[in-house]
Amino acid sequence: MWWTDVRRLFSGGCLLAFAALLGCKATPPGKLESGAVTFAKHHVFVGNKKQKNPLPDNHDTWTDGKEAFSHYCVACHGNDGQNTGVPFVNHISPPIPSLASKDVQAYTDGQLKWILDNGIWPSGMPGSKGTLSDDELWSIIVYIRHLPPAGSQGVPDMYTH
Amino acid sequence: MKMKYILVTLILLGAAFVPLKSNIRAQEAPKRIEITAKQFEFQPSEITVKKGQPIVLVIKSADVAHGLRFRELNLNVKIDKGGTAELPFTPDKTGDFVGHCSVFCGPGHGGMTLTMHVVD
């Protein structure tokens, strides 16, 4: 009798695990899903809308931002912030956005800082607070505001050897 | 007449000694401050220096490549892996200045800071 209960419990557990794995299958989100999530991120989840970038928007800051970006962000976003040369860009869901896209550029500087600090769950975007300094993060935002043309910066070194 | 000569001589002597005094200050040997950079801290993490006194920060890396940048003071130096670099300068304003590691050195890089107190 007890053995039957154990078997039932085991079978139930397997079914639940299988269902959970099915739920994890990475499929591209539909238009409605994307639209709802984008709206929620812009208006509800991503805070810090009003904070201004304390660094000047000039070529020196852009150069600093480009360098800081190259240490950490290029693995997923490419040298140009537009996913050039990222080998898994078409195999990940939710997809990695082009940082030049309207959706990304519509965030305020303060919101971009919030995203860089905290990441966006449950996407793969990690938080960088502590990994990069505030100065570096703010300079990255200047770089994101003035991205070079797509493809102009080549493929990240890590994917060329 | 004699008094005039004495006065002129005194003025000339005074003029000659004023620049000499400031030269002595400018040629003062810089104070050397040794700092160790390692993942993910500077040791010591705080230093106090005097405004106007020339200093040299002698920074030694105990592991990977690091950097030290004081954005406000327009100072930046890079230190090779296991190497030593010198950053000579003379602080010209008082205050607390925070320098950051300027070469990405790993997951704690963003919190690697050196605070410099410049006092009168």
Image (cartoon, grey):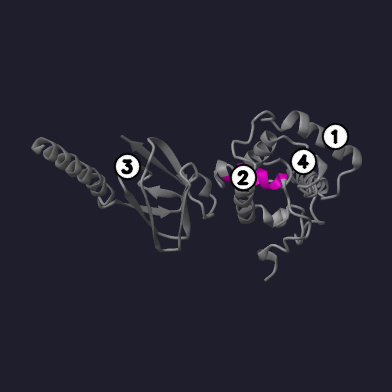
Name the residue type under label 3.
Answer: Gly
Q: Is residue A46 left or right of residue A72?
A: right
As rendered, which of A110 and A60 lies closer to the eye?
A60
Number of the front mark, 4 or 1? 4
Q: Is residue A87 above or below residue A119?
A: below
The Cα atoms of the two marked residues, 4 and 2, are separated by 15 Å
Residue A46, image x, y percentages: 71, 33
Q: Chain under label 1?
A: A
Q: Read off the residue under disc 3.
A: B52
User: Dot 4, crowdedness within 10 Å: few (<14), some or many (≥20)?
Assistant: some
The span shown in magenta is: A136-145
The mark found on residue A139 in the picture is 2
Q: Read off the residue under disc 1.
A: A36
SS at circle 1: helix
Q: Read off the residue under disc 4.
A: A105
Q: Is residue A119 above or below residue A84?
A: above
